Image: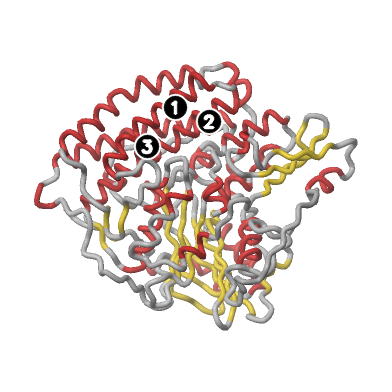
Amino acid sequence: MSSEVGSHMPAESALADILAPIADKIIGQETHRNAPAARISPRDVPAVLSTLKNESGLDHLSCVTAQQYADRYETIYHLRSYDDPTQEASIVVPTDSERPRSTSGSEVFQTAAWHEREAFDLVGINYEDHPDLRRILLPETWQGHPLSLGYDQTQPQIVPLREQDGSAHALASEGRGETMFINIGPHHPATHGVMHLKLTLEGEQVAAVEPDIGYIHRCEEQMAQTCTYRHQIMPYPDRWDWSGGGLCNEWAYARAAEALADIEVPAYAQVIRTLSAELSRILAHMLAIGAYALDISGDFTATFMYAITERERVQNILEDLTGQRLMFNYFRLGGVAWDLPESREAFLDRVRSYLDGLPERLTDIHNLLTNNEIIQARTVDTGILPAKIAKNYGCTGPVARGSGIDYDLRRDDPYGYYDRLDWDVITEPHGDNYSRLLVRIQEVEESAKIIEQCVDLLAEWPDDDRTVQSNVPRTIRPADDAEGYWAVEAAKGELGIYIRADGSEKPARFKIRGPSFSNLQALPAMAVGEHVPDLIATLGSLDTIMGEVDR
């Protein structure tokens, strides 16, 4: 069996084609390990992004990374194509070290608004023409920018308790009759975590809604930058998704670091990774399905408990494999921590037994949930997100596929063993809350297909070729200034990691692109004009996990 490296690079002709429309704007080129990279002037950001979006087909702004060097600040716009994410480019915008000012790309990609706010908040770059350049993860009173080189970690921080600023409320109230400003969260079960919604109502209709995030921000990017590549970073990705999708997140870091350090992964280990990641995806989707029943119809005793029972079955399997039930820390650079548990046959039989009973149990969940009149009344034709708007916000995962966007990195930018297995990408065309629910349930069925094929492969794998980890150096030091962005299809969507190396055993810059961050930004586009109960149904349909939003 062959081995593979988790990276790709377009052909030279493709590089020229991608960047050709902006040739007159390029002031320099860089070498990024995943994509062609061009430097441009800050004033040209909107024009360049618009040209690449409309002429080169790079219609997915997947991530925005900001960082500071000794002599400059820098913003990187990571662009991809929804039709083919292997077609990608990085647009690098250097700015002055004394006066870091750039130009916002939010008029071209709506998703840039939140990403640039984060860049301003944590790094300190100002974006001219930005529609709402405020802090997003830290309080407005915070002193300094934590990811800037000159940040003083010893300075005191005073965060007073004060009334909500009501900025969205003031804007929504202009020209309207009587409006009401209310808070939902941050400690409210309908917000699915420590999230605060600033809500303006006109009667019972939503006039404006503003997600207020950052309540559990830990600056995990900075924490990763203090850790070594080999062992110390890997435990963190599990904590970005406490719904159970941590193994998918571990793979995102593994893919990025392995590509950066040219580490190959044995094919046998890739099969184990694929099996475990799909079990992890089922964990995440089952929590989303069960919690949604609780949100919409108050169904705790039936659907919620059915979903939690299903999670328990999967957690028992993953506990046998990884030793953990949620914070797995099972992946290693170059493979996985260890082989299947002994006896192999008993473990594989246990997985098969689980898969054999899954179709009947999913039928029960369908009968309880998707055929439920209350669920249908509250989710069909509510929270509609058209495909064009979903793309503009950078939505991915079940949220995008529920709007008919046929985008899944497991197939479109293949890694692991996915491209050698038989499975389908699930989409629903209507873009409403019901569609997103259907996608998640059907994706559980597709995960089961993938797992079954992995079990068959592992059962027949030759004994002398069961290598679970390649020969990785004890200390990993990627080349100085090597950098790149790599992503996987995590449970919530595209989870990407940008890493820049400086020749040491710790990354100089570690950027996390959480799919829930971009998906949540689209909430106002889905909820404004609808009623308060629709807002709760729409928020739940996003399956937001605040660990990857706040990081």
Q: Which residue is mark 2?
A: 291
Instruction: Give the left or right position of residue 399, taking residue 196 as reference.
Output: left
Which of the two residues, 264 or 427, is positioned nearer the viewer here? 264
On screen, residue 540 versus residue 102, left or right, reads left
**Residue at 68% across / 68% down in the picture?**
156
Q: Residue at x 75, y 35 (%)?
A: 529
Find numbered disc 2 in the image and state the secondary structure of the residue it sits on.
helix
Pointer 1 local density, CA inside 10 Å: few below 14, some 14–19, many at least 20: many
Describe residue 473's horizontal placement relative to residue 92 as left or right: left
How far apart in space, not on screen, are marks 2 and 3 (Cα)? 25 Å
The kind of residue tagged 1 is: Ala
Which residue carries the number 3 mark? 424
Marks 2,3: beta carbons within 8 A: no
Is residue 16 in view from this perspective?
no
Counting from the top left corner in percent of width and height, residue 49 is at: 60, 63
- From what the image shows, is residue 126 above or below residue 248? below
Residue located beneath label 1 in the image: 307
- In the rendered image, is residue 315 in sight? yes
The colour style of the image is secondary structure
Callout 1 touching callout 2 (CB < 8 Å) = yes
Q: Nearer the viewer, mark 2 or mark 3?
A: 2
Pick the residue in front: 326 or 397. Answer: 326
Q: Earlier in the sequence, mark 2 or mark 3?
A: 2
Estimate the x, y position of residue 164 in percent, counting from the top left.
78, 49
Question: Which residue is rendered at x = 38% and y = 21% of the image?
Answer: 361
| Distance from Cα at disc 3 to Cα at disc 1 | 23 Å
Kind of residue indicated by mark 2: Ala
**Sooner in the amino-acid sequence: mark 3 or mark 1:** 1
